[in-house]
Amino acid sequence: MQTLLDELRHIVGNAHVFTDGDLTAWEQDWRKRSHGKALAVVRPACTEEVARVVKTCADYVSANPASGVSIVPQGGNTSLAVGSTPDESGRQIVLSLQRMNTVRGLDADNLTMTVEAGCILQNLQERAEEANLLFPLSLAAEGTCTIGGNLGTNAGGTQVVRYGNTRDLCLGLEVVTAQGEVWHGLSGLRKDNTGYDLRDLFIGSEGTLGIITAATLKLYPLPAARLTAWAAVPSLEAAVTLLGLAHRHLGAGLTGFEAMGQFALSLVAKHFAQLRVPLHLDAPFCVLLENSDQESELHAHTQFEHLLETALDQGCVTDAVVSETLAQAKQLWHVRESIPLAQALEGLNIKHDISVPVSSIPDFVRATDALLQQALPGVRLVNFGHLGDGNLHYNVQAPEGADAADFLRDHEARVNTLVFDSVQAFGGSISAEHGVGSLKVDHLAHYKSPVALGLMRAIKRALDPRNLMNPGRVVRV
């Protein structure tokens, strides 16, 4: 394979092909559960170089079909489904897009921004804000994750209830195909009815059909005010009732609606005492709401007051506070975003990123909690997430005092089956926003219809007949 590596060095420069030394940053997944071995890490600087790298690898595989060479596209390497790290074969090329981080243009009149795949999400948020505009995608890893990875996994985040997933924020793409050709689809059009929607085909495909190198994204006017409220609720049924009231009182201004279970918040209080979790920790659940208003801060406050007064009168809220300053709002969100970190400090755990219809969430949680407690007495449930769009991070922690690593090794498969079967029974999805990656690829045979899987395999074979692009992820062929 030395000839292949020499050709790749010729394309991107010797300094941007890594084969030796510590490659942990590219070879280990975000949660440190998987560590592979790359044939090389290749870092192109532009779309033309990406296309040449892919074409070179495709030609090499055609001439050497038994080589096992394939390509794993990678952005910020923040995947939670082990979708962007190499396997242990030593035959996979990690194609890192981090050098491709240019904002190619911002069209304020068209409310669009065209960016390269390696742009860090937080930088795009800040660039839009400099133009008095909003790019609303927001998630905990925004200081590290890249927009290419966000598009590849169709990431969700905290504002899906108003703006949708990443798919809903994208108008056009530039993609390098598995043959090394470039599809120039960077349209800023909101209406283009000229055939199959290729954009939606590549979004959410996790690099298995081609490599997203750039995108044209939707922007929105920057809100005049963004206020946050924290409310204690007596049950998940009450939280769902509060969500309905919020839709009626705030309308399109409701941009975030997060639910957090008592045990999840107790872990934040335990491991990050300086954050000061608001309200009392004896409430079964707390809810974090965000109201983005186009009129004024006074109007936003008035809306929140009416909403919370109604909720208190109806008994679906027992106590509430509204942020008075931007700093207070950030502190409230910081508590919510610290739950995964606190859970990690508590020990290894079994993570689930699931979705069910909002109306079914209370029954799903009640039924699944009971199943898990019956199967594994004392198990602790870290339940939190984006209740506004039906997405829960329904995570399972070992019983108090149990060895977390042993618990994971002995019970993960059983726990996954119990949770996923329950998700299916309630008409949900076993992956809401993290993608499939390699972590859930073998579960799809049980929870995806045979017709859907057949169509997915047909698309994969048609667009990537050599199985060059991120094999073993999303769907097996």
Image (cartoon, rainbow, N blue to C red):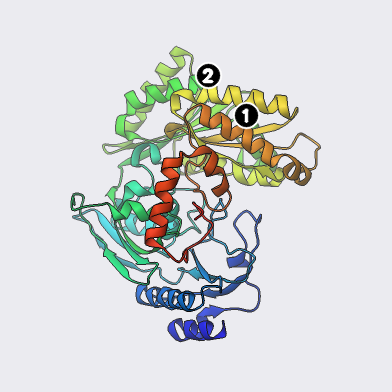
The answer to whether marks 1 and 2 mark residues whose Cβ atoms lie closer than 8 Å is no
Q: Is residue 136 visible?
A: yes
Q: Is residue 51 above or below residue 433?
A: below
**Residue indicated by mark 2:** 318
Task: Provide residue 348's location: percent of width, then percent of height.
Answer: 70, 46
Tell me the kind of residue under disc 1.
Gln
Query: In front: 416, or 158?
Result: 416
Where's residue 107, x and y in %?
A: 22, 59
Please name the residue shown 26% across and 62% down the image: 185
| Residue 476 drawn at (x, y percent) | 51, 54
Q: Nearer the viewer, residue 132 or 398?
A: 398
Q: Residues within 10 Å of mark 1 (few under 14, many from 20)?
A: some
Quadrant for residue 463, please give it: bottom left
Please give the count of numbered marks on the rendered protein: 2
Horizontally, residue 263 falls left or right of residue 461, namely: right
Q: Residues within 10 Å of mark 2 (few under 14, many from 20)?
A: some
Instruction: Tell me, for residue 262, which label it has, or none.
Output: 1
Q: Nearer the viewer, residue 276 or 153?
A: 153
| Residue 180 - label | none
Residue type indicated by callout 2: Thr
Horizontal and vertical percent position of residue 126: 38, 57
Front of the two marks 1 and 2? 1
Q: Secondary structure at mark 1?
A: helix
Provide the secondary structure element on which disc 2 rests. loop
Q: In which quadrant will I find the N terminus?
A: bottom right
Position of 95 relative to 319 (above/below): below
Lower position in the chain sequence, tag 1 or tag 2: 1
Observer able to see residue 156: no
At 81% across and 37% down in the image, what residue appears?
401
* Of 74 and 281, the residue lying toward us: 74
Rendered residue at 50%/19% (across/down): 237
In the rendered structure, the answer to whether residue 106 lies left or right of residue 43 reads left
